[in-house]
Image (cartoon, rainbow, N blue to C red):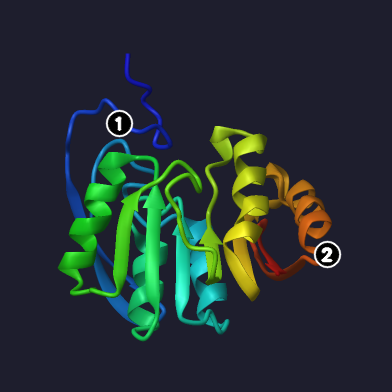
């Protein structure tokens, strides 16, 4: 039986594609979504807080959206930073197909979208920023792996930015990131969502 979670490789779903437009970082973006992906009806609040915070940072020229889903974070940042290359990865093949469609719908060519289980298919070690809204339901080990192994894929001075809810692990993630990077600050807070930033 196929696991029916948005963080599994091939969610077993009845397809019901939907489209909506959402304004992110001042740009109207069109999204196609479907059953079997995270937050299919609208851009989830955590991702919005993360995108807003990331939009205020200098993310550099090489960005990784880790666990990209159907693409709101990576595509919003690709649109805002046309000079940057944005790599977008997810374990969920359905989400990746949607992310590719959404990149095309919005005319974004500065993206590279492909399958990866966390970092297993991520080759580069010189990202200037790694951005993630980690799948809390996948468990603490997965979330902490996403946050800490980012270090091996960042250029010196590169940053990892993550959104977590205070009640769903932000304090323990902050502690873990401080151990690994020697620093971690909360750069934004909204309705219990914390944006954590560590610099390599």
The answer to whether residue 140 is above or below residue 61 is above
Q: Mark 1 or mark 2: which comes first in sequence?
A: 1
Residue 10, disc: 1
* Image position, residue 63 (x, y; %): 47, 70
Task: Give left or right: position of 90 versus 12.
Answer: right
- Residue 29 falls in image quadrant: bottom left
Task: Give left or right: position of 101 versus 68.
Answer: left
- Camera-near label (1 vs 2) is 2
Of 200 and 7, which appears nearest the observer? 200
* Image position, residue 155 (x, y; %): 60, 72
Element at badge 1?
loop
The residue most toward the top is 1
The answer to whether residue 23 is above or below residue 140 is below
Q: Residue at x 24, y 74 (%)?
A: 108
Residue at which label 2 appears = 182
Q: Residue at x 55, y 34 (%)?
A: 138
Element at badge 2?
loop
Q: Residues within 10 Å of mark 1 (few under 14, many from 20)?
A: some
Q: Residue at x 70, y 69 (%)?
A: 200
Quarter the N terminus occupies: top left
């Amino acid at each position: 039986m196929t696991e029916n979670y948005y963080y599994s490789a091939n969610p077993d779903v009845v397809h019901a594609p939907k489209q909506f437009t959402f304004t992110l970082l001042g740009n109207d973006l069109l999204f196609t979504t479907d059953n079997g992906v995270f937050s299919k009806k609208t851009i989830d609040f955590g991702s919005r807080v993360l995108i807003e915070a990331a939009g205020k940072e200098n993310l550099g020229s090489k960005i990784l959206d880790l666990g990209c889903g159907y693409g709101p974070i990576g595509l919003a940042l690709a649109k805002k930073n046309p000079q940057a290359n944005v790599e977008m990865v997810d374990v969920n093949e359905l989400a990746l197909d949607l992310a590719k469609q959404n990149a095309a719908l919005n005319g974004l060519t500065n993206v590279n979208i492909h399958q990866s289980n966390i970092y297993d298919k991520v080759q580069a070690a010189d990202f200037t920023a790694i951005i993630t809204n980690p799948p809390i339901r996948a468990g603490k080990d997965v979330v902490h792996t996403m946050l800490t192994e980012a270090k091996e894929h960042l250029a010196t001075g590169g940053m990892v930015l993550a959104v977590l809810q205070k009640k769903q692990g932000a304090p323990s993630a902050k502690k873990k990131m401080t151990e690994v990077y020697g620093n971690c600050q909360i750069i934004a807070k909204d309705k219990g969502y914390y944006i954590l930033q560590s610099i390599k």
